[in-house]
Image (cartoon, rainbow, N blue to C red):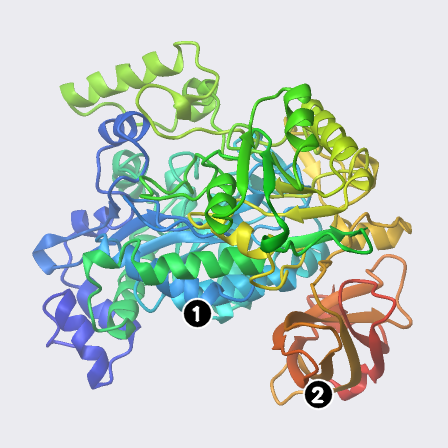
């Protein structure tokens, strides 16, 4: 250990057999006490940094935490996500279930090229209710989906930068996130809201970000049960825990003692409080400091010793390869929900040679709309292809007209003369996204977490922030010159009334009407969806979204996306949701599990999505895996249609002798397969047995003595093939 004299030498020591922990111990011994404290928060003074965030823009350069130039310690150089790298010019990526690791690799390269080493964008919160404003940052309603994609993104990102999984835990309300206490039993935590974090930890994620909300009466950033007992004690996490920005902790000493290693993103509470608390020696000790210091250093050493050796060039940002990847991801994520027959054949895919006049209609038809304008927003993206641009570019021989006004008669007129009408509706950052009301800035409880200005520049910056917050703006993120805009939790799960009117009017004069819905969470569409033959969920589909939409509508690719959540027929089939609540209790029941529990039929169930071809599934086999808590599934998939296609094998476990207080059907795993016309393939799926278990007496036990393993198109697929498995034969 004596050979370690700097951070680079600590990294080099790993190749000669040192562990990251032993190297970190040796490096920590070289730090002075002030340097050790410096590692525990951000490097930028609070008021100057906060003012810059609100005016010049969020995360325009990495937020640095704990850089020690004397010993060449880089610190954590934070860039946000998850839809791409939020600093200048990085590629926007939409949600996609099969390309996530490749997307992670691209994001990691871009982040590293922009001088970051710490990516805060592995968002795996479970959207308990579709009104949650930040659903677009995560993956879906099921822990298996969340865990699989969180792990995949982590693996890809960490080839170049450290990944952070967030927001731990129970963060699925936006407007109330700074005040709400979310109550959940240990059973519900372990079975529903924590498994995906555990899966991402097992994939080697190097950092966990805590949530703003409190959990069972303790703020998440100060919750020792979550941070130490579960995360480190039960799961063996060895990385670093960081707070969410600015309001992520309320007590500097308590948070450190509870296992919060780094206060993000400025020098805020700890810089002014910890030294005195340490001198008192009552609430926190130097042992607590050194514990976090060693974790911080070991995490950096572990990463720098294992990341790819080659430094990516600056021109990797928004390069051709990444734009192609964005288009592929958007193509494979779009979900075809309805494809009714018109003139004796399905309305989709469209035949370009049959189209002379195409109407593209709706307020979002030509809008640059990549979603949230808050912390996950990608800045200065050089190109975003709109729906209109993509469709017009794909149909050079057709007349493609645009009608984007909220004018029912204008839309009706455009549709009446068209061979096909494509209506693009849904939401924007004004409707859903990250939200900080101006009153948050001056809320007395939160204001108490801000430090006293240390000099005249800080005093001036403080006054400017306060003036902005008291200047009458309802949305501080949209104040001044900031590029951050936000919508918060969705107030309605339906389209605007004018959108529904336009859809009905156009459908009345154009029999080939296709509606494309831009959204993050479920949209209730019962009042109009039966009047149109074609319906696509096109998501916030990123820089290449318009091209990808044209690819799907014209059949250049199969419609291969599947819903990562269920869509109910009405709001009454959803859990309670009060966007201004100060307290709420979460139970096991949400999404498809709630619909099954109550016997309510979904408009579209979890996993649903149509293809342009047909498939037959047969010969399902299930057996214990060599790996613990896994089950090996094989199933034959045959393409019985007239074109090549993509099938997502979904494996569900149906409890044969379960109880009413446990889900009757749970997702265990999934795998995509591309199958050519007339071809058959045997698909292997490694499924998890964890969803079949319930938390009891401090551990997991199977909830049923036997399970019917189903392989099908979606949850509850009546054509699914199944086989019965005794749990005594499983791990």
- Does residue 475 appear left or right of residue 462 in this picture? right
Q: How many marks?
A: 2
User: In x, y percent, where is residue 609?
Assistant: 71, 58
Q: Residue at x 77, y 46 (%)?
A: 533
Q: Residue at x 12, y 59 (%)?
A: 72
Measure how far apart labels 1 and 2 are at the Cα level: 25 Å
Q: Looking at the image, which is closer to me, 199 or 261? A: 199
Horizontal side, residue 391 vs residue 678: left or right = left
- Identify the mark nearer the N-term, 1 or 2: 1
Find the residue positioned furthest to the top.
Answer: 471
Residue ID for mark 1: 204
Q: Position of residue 579 (x, y in %)?
A: 64, 29
Crowd rating for badge 2 (residues with CA inside 10 Å; few <14, some 14–19, many 20+): some
Disc number placed over residue 131 in the picture, else none: none
Q: Is residue 631 left or right of residue 70?
A: right
Do the numbered discs 1 and 2 sit on residues whose CB atoms are within 8 Å? no
Secondary structure category for the residue under label 2: strand
Task: Report the front residue among 548 and 156.
Answer: 548
Give how far across and how far down residue 106 sits, in percent: 35, 62
Q: Position of residue 395 (x, y in %)?
A: 51, 49
139 relative to 530, above or below: below
Please tell me which residue is depicted at 85% across the width and 73% down the height of the picture.
Answer: 704
Residue receiving disc 2: 624
Task: Classify mark 1: residues with Cα within 10 Å, few (<14), some (14-19) or many (20+).
Answer: some
Q: Quadrant of residue 270?
A: top left
> In this image, 593 relative to 65: left or right?
right
Q: Is 709 rendered above or below residue 490?
A: below
| Quarter location, residue 483 | top left
- The residue drawn where x is 46% and y is 42% is 389
* Quarter of the figure that contains the N terminus: bottom left
């Amino acid at each position: 250990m004596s050979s370690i004299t700097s951070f680079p030498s600590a990294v080099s020591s790993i190749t000669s057999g040192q562990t990251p922990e032993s190297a970190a111990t040796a490096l920590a011994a070289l730090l002075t006490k002030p340097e050790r404290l410096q590692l525990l928060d951000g490097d930028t003074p609070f008021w100057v940094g906060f003012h810059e965030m609100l005016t010049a823009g969020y995360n325009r350069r990495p937020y640095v935490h704990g850089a020690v130039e004397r010993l060449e310690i880089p610190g954590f150089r934070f860039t946000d996500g998850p839809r791409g790298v939020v600093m200048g010019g990085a590629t926007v990526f939409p949600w996609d279930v099969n390309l996530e690791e490749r997307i992670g690799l691209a994001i990691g390269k871009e982040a590293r090229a922009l001088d970051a080493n710490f990516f805060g964008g592995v968002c795996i919160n479970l959207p308990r209710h579709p009104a949650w404003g930040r659903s677009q940052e995560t993956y879906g309603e099921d822990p298996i989906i969340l865990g699989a994609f969180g792990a995949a993104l982590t693996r890809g990102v960490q080839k170049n930068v450290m990944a952070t999984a967030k927001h731990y835990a129970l963060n699925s309300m936006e407007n109330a996130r700074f005040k709400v206490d979310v109550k959940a039993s240990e059973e519900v935590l372990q079975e529903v809201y924590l498994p995906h974090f555990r899966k991402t930890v097992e994939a080697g994620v190097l950092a966990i970000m805590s949530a703003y909300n409190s959990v069972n009466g303790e703020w998440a950033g100060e919750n020792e049960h979550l941070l130490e007992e579960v995360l480190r004690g039960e799961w063996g996490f060895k990385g670093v825990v960081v707070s969410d920005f600015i309001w992520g902790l309320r007590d500097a000493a308590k948070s450190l003692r509870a296992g919060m290693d780094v206060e993000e993103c400025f020098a805020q509470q700890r810089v002014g409080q910890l030294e005195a608390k340490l001198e008192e020696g009552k609430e926190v000790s130097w042992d607590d400091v050194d514990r976090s210091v060693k974790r911080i250093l070991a995490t950096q050493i572990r990463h720098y010793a294992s990341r790819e050796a080659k430094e990516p060039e600056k021109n990797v940002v928004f390069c051709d390869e990444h734009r192609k990847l964005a288009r592929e991801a958007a193509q494979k994520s779009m979900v075809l929900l309805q494809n009714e027959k018109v003139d004796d054949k399905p309305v989709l895919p469209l035949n370009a040679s049959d189209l002379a006049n195409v109407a593209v209609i709706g307020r979002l038809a030509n809008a640059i709309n990549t979603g949230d304008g808050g912390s996950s927003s990608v800045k200065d993206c050089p190109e975003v292809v709109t729906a209109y641009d993509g469709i017009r570019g794909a149909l050079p021989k057709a007349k493609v007209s645009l009608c984007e006004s909220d004018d029912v008669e204008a839309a009706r007129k455009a549709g009446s003369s068209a061979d096909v009408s494509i209506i693009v509706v849904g939401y924007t950052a004004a409707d859903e996204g990250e939200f900080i009301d101006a009153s948050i800035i001056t809320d007395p409880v939160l204001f108490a977490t801000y430090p006293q200005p240390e000099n005249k520049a800080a005093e001036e910056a403080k006054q400017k922030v306060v003036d902005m917050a008291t200047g009458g703006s309802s949305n501080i993120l949209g104040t001044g010159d900031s590029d951050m805009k936000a919508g918060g939790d969705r107030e309605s799960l339906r389209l605007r009334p004018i959108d529904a009117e336009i859809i009905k009017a156009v459908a009345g004069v154009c029999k080939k009407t296709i509606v494309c819905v831009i959204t993050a969470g479920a949209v209730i569409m019962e009042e109009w969806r039966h009047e149109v033959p074609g319906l696509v969920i096109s998501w916030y589909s990123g820089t290449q979204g318009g091209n990808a939409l044209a690819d799907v509508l014209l059949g250049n690719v199969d419609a291969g996306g599947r819903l990562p959540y269920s869509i109910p027929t009405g709001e009454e089939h959803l859990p309670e949701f009060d966007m201004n609540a100060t307290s709420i209790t979460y139970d096991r029941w949400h999404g498809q599990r709630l619909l099954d529990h109550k016997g309510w039929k979904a408009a579209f169930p979890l996993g649903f999505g149509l293809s342009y071809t047909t498939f037959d599934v047969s010969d399902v086999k299930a057996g214990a895996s060599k790996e613990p808590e896994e089950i090996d599934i094989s199933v034959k998939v045959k393409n019985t249609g007239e074109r090549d296609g993509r099938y997502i094998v979904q494996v569900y476990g149906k409890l044969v002798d379960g109880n009413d207080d446990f889900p009757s059907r749970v997702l265990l795993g999934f795998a995509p397969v591309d199958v050519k016309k007339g071809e058959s393939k045997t698909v292997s799926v490694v499924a998890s047995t964890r969803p079949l278990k319930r938390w009891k007496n401090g551990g997991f036990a199977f909830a049923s003595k036997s399970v019917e393993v189903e392989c099908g198109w979606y949850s509850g697929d009546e054509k699914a093939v199944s086989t019965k498995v005794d749990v005594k034969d499983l791990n």
